[in-house]
Amino acid sequence: MNFAMILFVLLLFTGAFALADAVYFRKQRRGDDREPWWIEYPKSFFPVILIVFLLRSFLVEPFKIPSGSMVPTLVVGDFILVNKFAYGIRIPLINKKIINVGEPRRGDVMVFRFPEDPSLDYIKRVIGVPGDKIVYANKRLFINGVEQPHRQTSDYLHRERIHYSRQLLEKVGGVEHAILIEDEAPSAVPFMRAFPFRENCNYNNEGVACAVPPGHYFMMGDNRDNSADSRVWGFVPDENIVGKAFFIWFNFSELRRYIEYFTVKKAIVGVAQTTGKGTVGEVRQAFDRRAQIDDIDVISGKDLEITKEGNDIVISFAYPKRIPLFGNVSVVIEFAASSNN
């Protein structure tokens, strides 16, 4: 039994006691009689459970990332929030859409019920929408005959196994995101299963080509060679959609994400102390070396402002942190500091 069903059962249980008290038991009590505990407790919990049920069903729902298929966008242990109304208002439990608010777009990160086992929630990126022709050949993505733009960036370090993966910035549907490629992995899909509309896909040594059927979506993980996705188990039907992921709110094992400002500040103070008599170019290079060690990717040496105060060197930095909330709404936090304050 999933959590939504448990909430629904508790809602019915506590609601039944609240209704029974309003209709019958309250009339049987004398004015100075206290409510019995078996009436008081369910009545107290009913409004709380109702609010939680409505919030999770129609507004936002929290999820925890269980696997590394969406690295580097999402890592194992990320707690995320999912917008439940972005793709339409749905009846809880049966997930039937009753009001169409919007449709998934290419590039969205979407939570959905796994087609092979709807009791499991999966999260991947939307690559193909109904009617699209998707080709993933030799680790390059084509949508409707157009190769999706990508550019090389710094390699990604998997800290848990001290391994680097080639990292690219890819743009799908106007959304730029990082993907990982393992050059030693084969281009061909190593295994695939039987699934509805399997005849829409053609597999070969270079990869796979699929025509997305009506009412379905083609999903892929950002960790391209370590993701079992639509290439393996097929298309996601519209009735399996849960919502659009829009915010990472915490990860207990990745606390460095939330203290990155202090990591940058410590780095520039260290660089100022060790390269105080160096040239501007030497200071920038020293910071870039330190950034690679400390895994700092929000700023680089070329972004630093470097000045002299007497015999001391002062390094300053500033960078914005954009936190997407929903739709086109974001919160931007501006971080700034210098090595002498």
Image (cartoon, rainbow, N blue to C red):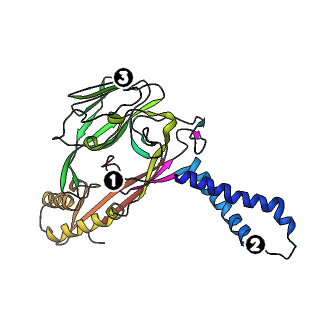
- Residue 199's label in the rendered image is 3
Q: Give the residues in magenta.
A: 61-89
Instruction: Determine which residue is flagged by label 1.
Output: 75
Specify few, some or many for label 2: CA neighbours under 10 Å numbering under 14, 14-19, or 20 or more: few
Type of amino acid at the residue the image marks with label 1: Val
Type of amino acid at the residue the image marks with label 2: Pro
First in sequence: mark 3 or mark 2?
A: 2
Q: Are marks 1 and 2 in contact (CB under 8 Å)?
A: no
The answer to which image quadrant residue 77 occupies is bottom left
Dot 2: what SS?
loop
Nearest to the observer: residue 134 or residue 12: 12
Q: Gap between marks 1 and 2, in whole Å?
A: 48 Å
The answer to which image quadrant residue 296 occupies is bottom left
First in sequence: mark 1 or mark 2?
A: 2
Q: Residue at x 39, y 25 (%)?
A: 132
* Residue 291 screen position, x and y as percent: 21, 59
Q: Do the residues labelled 3 and 2 touch (CB within 8 Å)?
A: no
Q: Which residue is drawn at 52% across and 36% down?
A: 239
